[in-house]
Amino acid sequence: MHTRSLITIGLLLLTQDENQLRPDPPIVCDACDGWNRAQTPFRIFGNAYYVGVGGLSAILVATDDGHILLDGGLPQSAALIDANIRALGFRTQDIRLIVNSHAHFDHAGGIAALQRASRATVAASPAAAEALRTGRPTADDPQFAYGGSFPAVGGLRVVQDGETLSVGDQEITVRFTPGHTPGGTSWTWRSCEGARCLDMVYADSLTAVSAPDFRYTGDDTHPSIVETFQRSIDTVAALPCDVMVSTHPEFSNLFDKLGRRDRGIDPDALIDAQGCREYAAGAAETLERRIAEEQSAAR
Ligand SMILES: [Zn+2]
């Protein structure tokens, strides 16, 4: 009896340890509670599932040989992402690869805990890897002066633009899109439902926002930050793109589209061949406005 209860407790602890994510302390910010509201996970298309929170995207691309996770939200999002993955019938421990849109606390903050729980490799561009490894934006980040540190990430694999990574027979391609951050990366892959396969895009933030003293214009390096940013916007506009999800789901109207699909108005509501181009056009407008503001301030 005594031995059996000890064994039972032992097994219980073992199971708990295996299944339990150990989150990092939460980050407090004005927008954080709103971003981190609970969100029921759902299938985006094929083997791609939305597992993020209400205001910060995270996507699971599931395969029989392990999963790919795109982004980890805030540190306090990690437990919600973990619960969403389990609610869909998958296991966080089966994540083999984690990738990140950009190394800011609201998209990379939960990665360290999710990486510990899964022992997954985290793939990142050279600039993003530097930020992830140290747990803070690099000095050339437009928002560097805000600080914005987050839990540092280990187990990094540095990748190059255009490289294709795989988990089982699922491939995912690296698309460098610097501008919002120096290491910003968009990710593309194909997901299938039966014979129907679509081009999926997880588009990085392309918003020209910065800490007060940063200027996009007036740098004499070549290519300048503005040229680099414009090229990233052009890259996203030109991607093969049937389904696009942005880092903040509302930037691609994800939940409006989901509502139309759930209400049976349009079973293909999440499929939008113009999604990447429209998103890029909005980013180009914001960047142009920002350049004009900087130029008029300089006069
Ligand atoms: Zn950001």
Image (cartoon, rainbow, N blue to C red):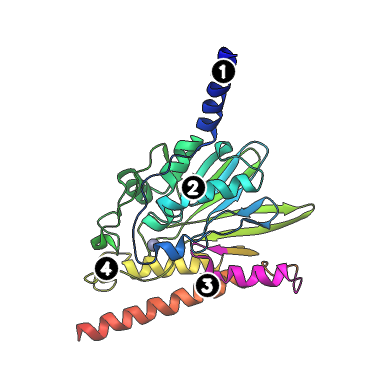
* Residue identified by numbered label 1: 7
240 horizontally vs 215: left or right: right
Checking the image for residue 211, the label placed there is 4
**Mark 3 nearby-residue class (10 Å; few <14, some 14–19, many ≥20):** many
Place of residue 31 in the rendered image (x, y in percent of width and height, measured from the top left): 39, 66
Which callout, 3 or 4, points to the residue nearer the camera? 4
> Which residue is painted at 51% across and 27% down in the image?
13
Please name which of the two marks, 2 or 1, marks the residue nearer to the observer.
1
Q: Which span of residues is magenta-colored? A: 245-266
Ligand 1 position by quadrant:
bottom left
Query: Where does residue 50 sit, x and y in percent of width and height?
Result: 60, 56
Q: Which residue is mark 3?
A: 279
Separation of disc 3 and disc 4 at Cα?
A: 23 Å
Q: Amino acid at mark 3?
A: Tyr
Q: Which numbered disc, 2 or 1, marks the residue that appears first in the sequence?
A: 1
- Crowd rating for badge 2 (residues with CA inside 10 Å; few <14, some 14–19, many 20+): many
Q: Are marks 3 and 4 in contact (CB under 8 Å)?
A: no
Residue flagged by tag 4: what amino acid is it? Ala
User: Farthest right residue?
Assistant: 195
Mark 2 → mark 1, Cα distance in angstroms:
28 Å
Q: Could you tell which of marks 1 and 4 lies nearer the N-terminus?
A: 1
Query: Which of pointers 2 and 4 lies earlier in the amino acid sequence?
Result: 2
> Label 4's element?
loop
Going from N to C along the chain, the mark reached first, 1 or 3, is 1
For residue 79, the mark is 2
Visible in this render: residue 51?
Answer: yes
- Residue type, label 2: Ala
